Image (spheres, helix red, strand yellow):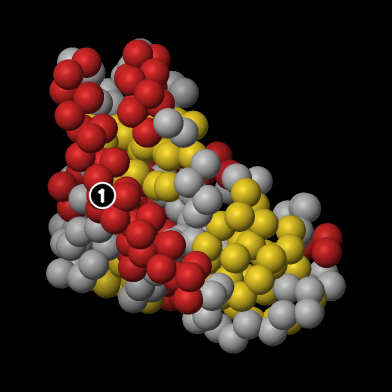
Amino acid sequence: MIIIGVRFKDVGRIYYFDPGDFDPPRGSAVIVETVRGAEYGTVSLSRREADVSDLQQPIRKVLRLATPEDEAQEINNRQKEIDARATCIEKIKAHGLEMHLVDVELTFDLSKIIFYFTADGRVDFRELVKDLASTFRTRIELRQIGVRDEAKILNGIGICGRGICCASFLDEFQPVSVKIAKDQGLGLNPTKISGVCGKLMCCLKYEEETYAELNKGLPSVGDKVTTPDGDGEVLSVQVLRQSVKVAVKKKGQDAYETGFYPVQDIKILSHRPPCAQNCHCGACKKKAQA
């Protein structure tokens, strides 16, 4: 079927719609049908053929191309969001709730106002909802979000000196684990591998496949290996250079000498014994898989 891709926020998820007879160019504004009613969005992907089985169902329709009146209403809605934010902050203080308001979103037809907030735990905001509903005379939704979503909304500067990825171009979050940092040989200092949100940096995910491929066939620290200069023990591994640092006891010598060897020039003789019973460190897991 023919679809177009629409975003409702500058760096938000792309949703797919049936354009019907409309052919809106990329960057133009459209009014589309959503589960929340009519919404104002921007075309990110122009008309194209797509396999229905690859799309999230149902595919709703584009109602019309945005008119100057629609654009004026959208601008007016953004101003109302600013006013609603100030009102909500005052009422949060009045009710003495431990919550931080992050963002406010009005639906295009003003049928609902959504307040996004963060909190350390669960918050009983039932009285706050009643107060807001009586003030704005419309449906109210309070939605608790996580710190990653908060960072995406508020934006910021990463340790690289550039705008954070989630607010610049990432439309969806990807899971990032400590294992990814370990596979890349990074120190597990939280201040070095965490983003402004306090979670592991999204950019660790970018090179995961490359490191997974490069780690294949590499020994672990403590493994016994043979080198062109004799047998020895692995002291460190340089994944990108595909080389290992080995303490080698050369023939006819009692002392050990260290040197770097390309991975193709060594052969693993035995793996380092497990650290302890039921150990789950990366090195032991790697040996178990081997």
Apparent side of residue 150 relative to residue 30 in the rendered image (left or right): left
Q: In the structure shown, which secondary structural element does the residue marked by tag 1 occupy?
A: helix
Query: Residue 91 location, x and y as percent?
Result: 22, 25
Apparent side of residue 70 relative to residue 289 in the rendered image (left or right): left
Query: Residue 111 location, x and y as percent?
Result: 52, 41
Q: Residue at x 63, y 82 (%)?
A: 24
Query: Residue 166 location, x and y as percent?
Result: 36, 59
Tell me which amino acid carries mark 1.
Ile
- Camera-side residue of 112 and 225: 112
Location of the N terminus (image quadrant): bottom right
- Camera-side residue of 288 and 224: 288
Q: Residues within 10 Å of mark 1 (few under 14, many from 20)?
A: few
- Camera-side residue of 289 and 260: 289
Height in image: 281 above or below 227?
above
Height in image: 173 above or below 67?
above
Q: Residue at x 32, y 50 (%)?
A: 80
Height in image: 199 above or below 138?
below
Q: Residue at x 61, y 75 (%)?
A: 65
Q: Residue at x 55, y 83 (%)?
A: 26
Q: Which residue is mark 1?
A: 82
- For residue 28, say whether it is visible: yes
Please give the count of numbered marks on the rendered protein. Answer: 1
- For residue 174, say whether it is visible: no
Query: Residue 36 location, x and y as percent?
Result: 60, 45
